[in-house]
Image: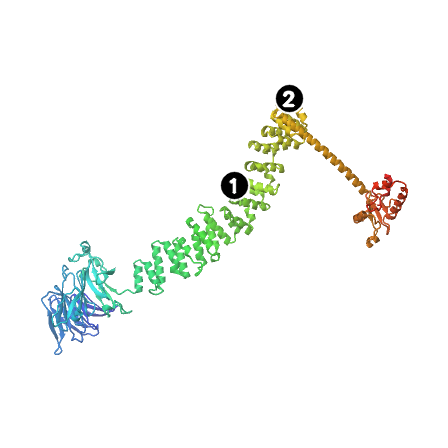
Amino acid sequence: MVALGTHNGTLHILDFQGNQVKEIAAHTATINDISFDADGEYIGSCSDDGTVVISSLFTDEKLKFEYHRPMKTIALDPDYYRNYRRFATGGLAGQVLILTKKTWGGGYHKKVLRDGEGPIHSMKWRTDLLAWANDAGVKVHDMKMDKGIAFIERPKGIPRAEFLLPQLVWQDDTVLVIGWGTSVKIAAIRTDSQGLNGMQRSITTASYQKYVDIVGSFQTSYHISGIAPFGDLLVVLAYVSEEDKENNFSNAVPSRQGTAQRPEIHLVSWKNDELTTDALPIHGYEHYKAKDYALAHAPFSGSSNAGGQWAAGDEPLYYIVSPKDIVVAKPRDTEDHIAWLLQHGWHEKALAAVEAGQGRTELLDEVGSRYLDHLIIERKYAEAARLCPKLLRGSPSAWERWVFHFAHLRQLAVLVPYIPTENPQLSDTAYEVALVALTTNPSFHKLLLTTVKKWPPTLYSASPVISAIEPHLNSSSMTDLLKEALAELYVINSQYDKAFSLYAELLKPEVFEFIEKHNLHDDVHDKVVNLMTLDNKRTVNLLIQHRDTIPPNDVVGQLLHTSQSCDKKHLLHLYLHALFETDMNAGKDFHDMQVELYADYEPRMLLPFLRTSQHYRLDKAYEIFAQKELVREQVFVLGRMGNAKEALSTIINKLEDIQEAVEFVMEQHDDELWEELIRQCLQKPEMVGMLLEHTVGNLDPLYIVSLVPDGLEIPRLRDRLVKIVTDYRTETSLRHGCNDILKADCVNLLVKYYQEARRGVYMASMDEEVTGTRVDKGSSRASERSSSVRALEIKSRTRCGARCCLCFDPLSIQDISVIVFHCCHAYHLSCLEGGLDSMKSNSSSQGSDEGSEDGDVTPSGESRMRCVLCTTAAA
């Protein structure tokens, strides 16, 4: 229980939660001190009204003692009830009184333990040891032996007791802690068997075995308003005033009204090593003095040698009492430590403590939430986002709550890289909100593009994000990164035509594969310039391959009227050149333009183009060539325009190339041009010599020489004439040789033709063809050609109208073979054999050489069939 004494003399008994259990009207003035017995059944109090009252907490028993002098301190015997209700008290009278109940007759026996040493300010009783403090110092008395065992002098330079009371507390049965002013001393009660250690001050006699050993002593930088043990450490209630700070904590009387600081709790070792410090939230602390505070504690049942360890529920409690507040303190457990860390803003340490397994697992959510809240308040959004995966873990609801919270703060961009896409997977709305948030600021657009490519498209609907971006298409906030992100979203939404349009504007190299993959050739119409700027070679191939879908008129129109910064004329040249090579007539409407483009970018291709195309204006082409001084092209156009003389003049005067001039004249097939060529060459002696070299075979050199004016000096004339004569002889010799060869070939071919024409073709009857027999065994050539001749219509191929030239019967008589000659005369085989026999008999008188000359005998000696009519006519 907790007992409070008030200035009106009333005792209030409270439980540990602060609820009042009992109220005792004990005194009529200020209560100065209160003491419990060890069993917690009796409470004693003393007051400035000169009374001491001992009350039972569980009965109405109450004893009151009158001393007529203010009583400042009281101490009940720990075994109060068993030791004849003994207690000690003292006050301004300076007497230490021991009162013991008499064993017979009633009343109390009073004994003065000490007297004449000044007012008694504090008193503590532990087992058989009683310690009190007066103006001289602290004395320890062995109540069992009724002898004093120690006197510890009052520290020098400390304030008087009426300003700062001495603080006495037993740490255990043998250790007394004294806090007085700014001095702390720890006194250990020992026996002779323990020996003497270190600093000590003792009062011993031959009859006493106990003595006091000062085992610890140090000075503080504050005034001590209370002191209590905490295991092997000390809890000190510190009083600090402004004057103390200014005077470096001098030992003068502490503070005037209104200059005090918050009281502090210090946890220190016996060597004054400070472990922790806490400033207490006391109301009205500015107006309090050092003696207005008190520190009480519920003694720890264990020994001070236990290292300050205690079981759960057995922790010591500390009560810091001020005129209007009571602060209850107890050792911090893990959760208290975490709460304290959070309270002081050390959220990272609190998180580390929870992750180390200290405290309940549920604390992680609370600590994480508070840590994130703290970072948000501090505007450390990036750090908060980085910690979200660790703090929110696999909770979809927590993730979604923080996604929307970051969105509300317009800081969602820092969280997006950490938003999970699986384990857990959030709602599609959360992902859509995140993507839409990234569209609002150009600095987020790169992250938006990365996120769209990274997140699986099944997580969200692309339509809301597209709707958020499309209004910015024509605004200054539309960056290339945002366009690319929009294109990716169009692909996700299967809007390939719109995606292609953006890819083309962004000049993405993969746009060509995208066109082929999704068959977007119809959508290329209005993006020709972009594609040509990106890769003109691939674009030209694409346009040529699909020229039916993408007409040349559209392509040329876009390239001509584009406002983009590009070499549109060069791009036009590349396209029209490729188109012309593929299909000469596909771009005929632009051949005039193409002439100029060739002149600008590829003059070497002009002549092949001019020779092939018929769809350009000659006058306009000539103007272009004249401006650009393309002479050969001028010559060609002049020739096509019919102005051959001017063309020839241009070759001679500008090109000075006689060989080309001669070739030009030869192509024109105009004799007047030869005259013009000679006339113009005669004006330049060097030209005359060159003309003589190149006109061999075309003009008579003598004619040219005859036209040369007398006295005209022609360089290297002799050498050139020698060469002309030599070339002429060579040419003449070649001509004669060629003529002889041609004549011989003609004669041989005519003889061959004549001999072939005299030979007949044997045509067997149907029966002979089936049996494979042959009538004319001596004519092998006739059998080779029989198959081809049978295919002819005999009626149309013979001169006798499909009748035998000897018997004039129709050739198509059953089972009779037919002989047809190349002279188109046809005979029945039987008729021809009879005619040949009669001819042989008539010619038997002639020499045998004539027959051999006609070639009618085969190499084997057999006679061949001949046309009777032709042979007779020849004879």
Q: Is residue 310 left or right of residue 404?
A: left
Corner quadrant of residue 178: bottom left
| Residue 236 in the image: above or below residue 797 | below
Image quarter in which the N terminus is found: bottom left
- The residue that mark 1 highlights is 562
Q: Position of residue 544 (x, y in %)?
A: 58, 45
When asked about the image quadrant of residue 395, the answer is bottom left
Helix, strand or loop at label 1? It is loop
Q: Position of residue 70 (x, y in %)?
A: 13, 66
Specify the quadrant of the image occupied by residue 94.
bottom left
Q: Name the kind of residue labelled 1 in the image.
A: Thr
| Picture quarter with the C terminus | top right
Marks 2 and 1 sit apart, C-alpha to C-alpha, by 63 Å
Which residue is depicted at the point 56% across and 48% down?
521
Q: Which residue is denoted by mark 2 in the rendering?
A: 709
Amino acid type shown at disc 2:
Pro
Nearer to me, 591 or 659: 659
